[in-house]
Amino acid sequence: MERIKPDSSSGRVYLIGAGPGDPGLLTVRGKELLAEAEVVVYDRLASPRLLPFASPGAERIYVGKRMGSHTVTQEDINRIIVEKAREGKCVARLKGGDPFMFGRGGEEAQILAKAGIYFEVVPGVTSAIAVPAYAGIPLTHRAHTASVAFITGHRKLDSNEADIDWEGLAKGVGTLVFLMGMKNLQNIAERLMKYGRSPDTPVAVTRWGTTPLQTSVTGNLKNIAEKIREARLGPPSIIVVGEVVALRDKANWFENLPLLGKRILVTRTREQASDLVRLLERRGAYCLECPTIEVHWPKDLRPLDQAINSLASFDWVIFSSTNAVRFFFERLFGLGFDLRALGNIRIAAVGAGTGKAISDLHLTSDVMPDDFRAEGLMQAFSEIGVSGKRILIPRAEKAREILPSRLSELGAEVSLVTTYVTLAPKIKPEILAILEQEIIDVLTFTSSSTVKNFFYLLSDDLRNKIIGQAKVACIGPVTAGTAEAFGLEVTVQPDTFTIPSMVSAIEDLFK
């Protein structure tokens, strides 16, 4: 096929391999280009966790296909990426696995070349390699085999299919990896045995590999089809045939993660959820994000601006949350000040997370009590002495009054300034649909606001369904007290009120 010289006035298309499912396996180049794209065209096997890497203003087009029901035909996909590029846009075609490994990326590249559109191929981590690795199966091993073959398993296995050399595969290749072969598993096993492979050859089938839903079934060529029927395992799955499958008994690391497959509902703000989700997923959890709070600027910024402009008059600034740190300094910098504006002001922080947010700004907290609550800070101030001192507390519009009240009792002059407000967001219909379908193992709360809005935002039926299934985990006693006031039984509460400690406590729950 003759390639037309790319038209410099048209856009460009990046055929990006999204990897096998674990969002951490996206390449650095793929992430960079995804952030640049004006249009993201993605399929079913591209992890939805990758979409936040795209620009918030990017157009998102789903072209996913399910077995037996093609939402969008390949011809339509080709037309979409060509049309969007001809509009002068940067298009990211996000494809599960690797674009050129049974992914029809080659066909899309040919179409783009024929249309004279600039394109680039960004290789991805193919499931053919990644899924066996996550199942503890090395595809090659010095003591077992030095050869491996990747085969598409969805072809009709009749006499007209002459492009698969079954005898060569059965006798000449050590490890065989079949993609898209679940419907033909019985026939694949029979063909291999017919052409000389031992019926006792180990076989492993792994579904939803590299994701928290990963499940594996092992057997041999003569019984694997029956085992799969009994386990009711379906696509998307990878089939591995060969002696290396026997190594899985010792090398199976991913499926031994302590929270593998546990469904955990995260109610933090979307911006703050990443740390909690990342730590849970490292332990194998399947996280469902349903933010029950949003954080915004207050409608009137004048009190905050006045406090910032008069910083030199204060002796202390107390931050009780990471949001207070974020919004306060964002406004300070926005008004043209830098860190020198704090001068000789001393800083106090409530909680390790708040302390880290301060240290990330290259500042040091003068006081950060071991008890990550206002009560702990009051103990510290009672020992230091703050009588006659002017103290600024940037905080949420609605907050506990214990800290300013006790400081006033100690003789301090306290100024409160609303730095941010928390609101109850509208939960997206697709999230509600998932919550209706899924069984939740753990319900997490990281603030009293997340608890209150959980009861406010969800219908009685859905809320009661979740509460009836899930254990409740709260980050600390204040949040736990709010949960109990709403009638919840708190099962998990870490000794140290931090996200890492909360995750460790959830892990201990399932040991």
Image: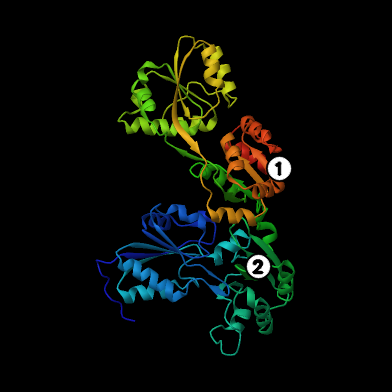
Marks 2 and 1, the one that precedes in the sequence:
2
- Which is nearer the eye, 1 or 241? 1
Q: Quadrant of residue 314?
A: top left
- Give the left or right position of residue 68, taking residue 36 as reference: right
Residue tagged 2: 205
Q: Quadrant of residue 374?
A: top right
Q: Which tag is nearer the camera, tag 2 or tag 1?
A: 1
Residue occupying image coordinates x 56% and y 13%: 382
Residue 12 coordinates in the image, percent (x, y): 32, 65
Task: Relative to 413, say whether 207 is above or below.
Answer: below
Q: Amino acid at mark 2?
A: Val
Q: Residues within 10 Å of mark 2 (few under 14, many from 20)?
A: many
Residue 495 visible in the shown view: no
- Give the left or right position of residue 325, taking residue 441 as reference: left
Q: Which residue appears farthest toward the left when viewing the image?
A: 8
Q: Amino acid at mark 1?
A: Leu
Residue occupying image coordinates x 45% and y 12%: 389
Residue tagged 1: 509
- Which is nearer the eye, 136 or 52? 52
Task: Relative to 190, say whether 410 is above or below.
Answer: above
For the C terminus, the quadrant is top right
Residue 205 coordinates in the image, percent (x, y): 65, 67
Residue 469 coordinates in the image, percent (x, y): 71, 48
Secondary structure under badge 1? Answer: helix
